Amino acid sequence: MWQFMLSAGRAGLRSRSIQAILILGALLVGVAYLAASFSPRQPQTVALDVGLSGLRITLILFSLFWVQELVAREIERRTVLFALTYPVARGHYIIGRYLGVLGLIALAAVLLGMLLWLAVLSLGKGYVQGFAIAPGFPYWFAVAGVWLDAAVVAAFALWVASFSTVPMLPLALGLAFAVGGKSLGAVAEYLAKGAEGDMGLMRLAPVIDAIQWVLPDLSRLDWRVWPMYGLTPDGQAVGLGLVMAASYAALLLTLAVIIFTRRDFE
């Protein structure tokens, strides 16, 4: 299992992904700067909000790209057969690849998070905001939530790759999963409040309730209000979010291992 994890890490570092991380990091800083200029009273807060949103998009794209390259492409090119010649269970390949992707996403999160952190701190010098940001532990706690979000999406993409015969399917479904999981909580809350009296939307409430049993609410991992406004997240809500992410990722990995073990590559 560990050899598959290490090989995934080496393959990811040898690719042009690190260059892409630096380029996206520069773009992320630039977008944060531009966004801050639209709010002269709260430049750091706006830059942090936009930057964390950009960080989530970037990490999800990277997670899907690495699953695509390290698993889906190997299955398509049949190079996975060389890995399966090792005297280890097939499940070790799936778990090892997933751990390798998690390590690569963590590296990207640290690099991009540091660039965003430096950009936010450089804004608004000589100006005291009404609500000071918290750039210490609360900021990195929010970055960790973004990493967990991407980790769940990566587990979903890996599950799709375990049975897919179309290389681009994990990428396409992974993007749809990331968008749906992030917006699910906001939609459910809006409907629970009556949808401003729109009965057409209220008819969708049973459908959304059913989807919540299948799709995780990834908005539970969004803890940006802590570094942005100093509002400490509720401990129980954070715990539920962590349990949800870990449980869902574990379930998807288990399904991926079962499917991949029974898959015929002949």
Image (spheres, rainbow, N blue to C red):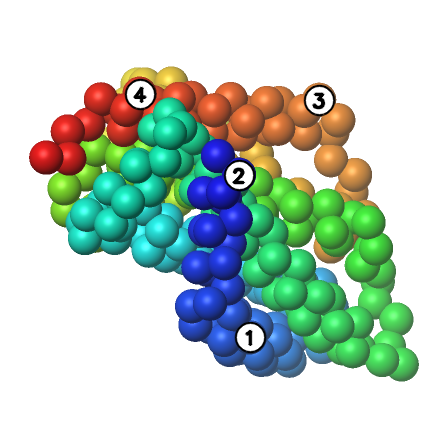
Q: Position of residue 98 (x, y in %)?
A: 46, 40
Q: Nearer the viewer, residue 3 or 46?
A: 3
Q: Which residue is mark 4?
A: 258
Q: Secondary structure at mark 4?
A: helix
Q: CA distance from mark 2 to mark 3?
A: 34 Å
Horizontal relation, residue 126 to residue 242: left or right = right
Q: CA distance from mark 1 to mark 4?
A: 37 Å
Which label sits in the foreground, 4 or 2?
A: 2
Q: CA distance from mark 2 to mark 1?
A: 28 Å
Packing grade of label 4 (10 A; few <14, some 14-19, many >=20) is: some
Q: CA distance from mark 1 to mark 3?
A: 36 Å
Packing grade of label 1 (10 A; few <14, some 14-19, many >=20) is: some
**Between disc 2 and disc 3, whose residue precedes?**
2
Regarding residue 119, the answer to whether it shows in the image is yes
Q: Which residue is mark 3?
A: 236
Q: Secondary structure at mark 2?
A: helix
Q: Which residue is mark 1?
A: 22
Horizontal relation, residue 96 to residue 176: left or right = right
For badge 4, the amino acid type reads: Ile
- Mark 1 touches mark 4? (CB < 8 Å): no
Q: Secondary structure at mark 1?
A: helix
Q: Residue furthest left?
A: 266
For badge 3, the amino acid type reads: Gln
Q: Quadrant of residue 181?
A: top left
Q: CA distance from mark 4 to mark 2?
A: 19 Å
For badge 1, the amino acid type reads: Leu
Q: Which residue is mark 2?
A: 2
Residue 21 versus residue 155 in the image, above or below: below
Which residue is pictured at 60% across the width and 52% down the height? 106
**Between disc 4 and disc 3, whose residue precedes?**
3
